[in-house]
Amino acid sequence: MRKLEAFIFDLDGVITDTAEYHYLAWKELAGELGIPFTREDNERLKGVSRLDSLEIILEIGSKQQAFTQEEKELLAKKKNTHYVDLIKQITPDDILPGIKTLLEDIKRAGIKIGLASASKNAPAVLKGLNLLEEFDYMADANLIAHGKPDPEIFLDVAENLKVKPENCIGIEDAKAGVQAIKRANMFAIGIGSTNLLREADIIYASTSELSFEKLTKEFC
Ligand code: BG6
Ligand code: MG
């Protein structure tokens, strides 16, 4: 029988909703490049790395060939400077419903807590939320070679928490994230649309539906 050893969380869209800040920062850059960029387009960027997100935006504007790699890195840097400025307003009030209680209940049960976020800004976001201390291990996105849906980041967290992947529950809001959890041979909880996240073992519409009791029962 499986034995639950760790919960591994995505950050953006699971612990807090930073998608709007990413959207605002990308929107400004896209505007400067003369590329139309909508909230719907922004959905495609969830769970996707910074440079890959830029590629998607350039593709929308048919401008993928218009810049050298060096110029693309500068554009991504510009977006990030704006994003970093926007996330300065994050406070503990921005923790999504149900998450704080879930983290407390996991800790009380003596189960490990990890973070598998593709964001290089994860430590700054967690600091704003006052949640830095809650995690036993956080993956460093700078050191992960393959983005989600590759399982690398989830496997890195399991390894550093010294737990078996099959004894982990992963929680994600992005399709690529759910795929990464499944490829890592973990139990996947999806937050969002059933259509988009159908590869998850269980899907909830919102984080407010998450509870330690429910999740542990589903895992067993
Ligand atoms: C993910 C977000 O968590 O992090 C993506 O869902 C974002 O939208 C990615 O592009 C990388 O974030 P950052 O902060 O390193 O640019
Ligand atoms: Mg996410």
Image (cartoon, rainbow, N blue to C red):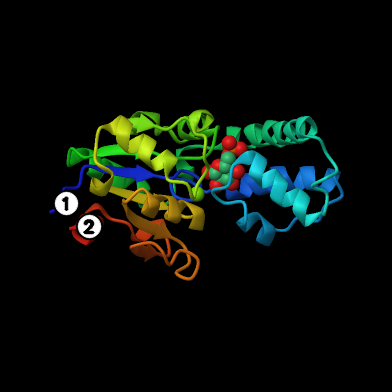
Could you tell me which secondary element the residue under label 1 belongs to? loop
Query: Which residue is drawn at the image coordinates 65% and 55% (left, top)?
Result: 42
Could you tell me which secondary element the residue under label 2 belongs to? helix
Q: Which mark is residue 75?
A: none
Q: Which mark is residue 219?
A: 2
Quadrant where the N terminus lies?
bottom left
In the image, farthest residue toward the bottom: 195
Is disc 1 surrounded by few (<14), some (14 to 19) or many (20+) residues within 10 Å? few
Q: Position of residue 37 (x, y in %)?
A: 76, 55
Q: Which residue is mark 1?
A: 2
Q: Position of residue 55 (x, y in %)?
A: 71, 46
User: In this view of the protein, can residue 97 be seen by the observer?
Assistant: no
In the visual, does 82 lie left or right of 207?
A: right
Q: Is residue 161 above or below residue 5?
A: above
Q: Quadrant of ligand 1?
A: top right
Amino acid type shown at disc 2: Phe
The label nearer to you, 2 versus 1, is 1
Amino acid type shown at disc 1: Arg
Query: Which residue is drawn at the image coordinates 62% and 51% (left, top)?
Result: 45
Is disc 2 surrounded by few (<14), some (14 to 19) or many (20+) residues within 10 Å? some
Q: Earlier in the sequence, mark 2 or mark 1?
A: 1
Decide: marks 2, 1 in contact (CB < 8 A)?
yes
Quadrant where the C terminus lies?
bottom left
Q: Is residue 166 above or below residue 138?
A: below
Q: Position of residue 78 (x, y in %)?
A: 74, 33
Q: Is residue 162 above or below residue 29?
A: above
Alpha carbon distance from label 2 to label 1: 8 Å
Residue in front for this viewpoint, 14 or 47: 47
In the visual, does 82 lie left or right of 152?
A: right
User: In this view of the protein, can residue 110 be seen by the observer?
Assistant: yes
